[in-house]
Image: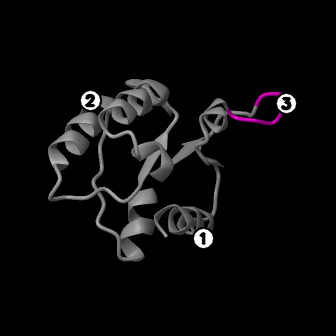
Amino acid sequence: MIATVLESAGATVLEAGSPSEAHDRLTDAGPERNVDALVLDWYLRDGSGQRLFDELASLAPDLPSRTVIVTGALLPARGRHPAEQLGVPVLCKPFRPAELLAMITRLVS
């Protein structure tokens, strides 16, 4: 659903089915293929979104400022997701396409 929403808004989307595939796609993108924003699910069935986030941030230190974390997990009692402590915006599932587009627009403008 995320790829469809972004593509319908005119974005070029690199999609990955696993953390290792995402890592490879983003590191293979190279300087000629600028990645404007990253939408990352925090809880992945084949690994940790946080671990992938940390790996990618070490390769591209400016990437966290262009990242949106999506999650279906319940927020802790204090109401903050762990990713928010990293300064990364979090979008809780279910969300509306307009919410995702607004968040991405804020990150890339």
Q: Is residue 95 magenta?
A: no
- Mark closer to the chain start, 3 or 1: 3
Quarter of the rendering occupied by the N terminus: bottom left
Q: Secondary structure at mark 1?
A: helix
- Horizontal and vertical percent position of residue 5: 45, 67
Residue located at (17% from left, 53% from top): 31
**Mark 1 neighbour class, 10 Å CA radius: few under 14, some 14 to 19, many 20 or more:** few
Q: Nearer the viewer, residue 43 or 63?
A: 63
Distance in Å between CA atoms under marks 1 and 2: 29 Å
Say above or below: 58 vs 71.
Answer: above
Give the farthest residue toward the front.
Answer: 61
Q: Are marks 3 and 1 in contact (CB under 8 Å)?
A: no
**Mark 3 neighbour class, 10 Å CA radius: few under 14, some 14 to 19, many 20 or more:** few
> Which of the 4 quarters of the picture holds residue 95?
bottom right
Q: Secondary structure at mark 2?
A: helix
Question: Number of callouts in the render?
Answer: 3
Q: Nearer the viewer, mark 3 or mark 1?
A: 3
> Which of the 4 quarters of the picture holds residue 14?
bottom left
Q: Which mark is residue 98?
A: 1
Q: Amino acid at mark 3?
A: Arg
Residue located at (42% from left, 67% from top): 6
Pointer 2 residue = 20
Q: Nearer the viewer, residue 67 or 1?
A: 67
Q: Amino acid at mark 1?
A: Ala
Pointer 3 residue = 78
Q: How is the image coloured?
A: one colour
- Horizontal and vertical percent position of residue 45: 43, 27
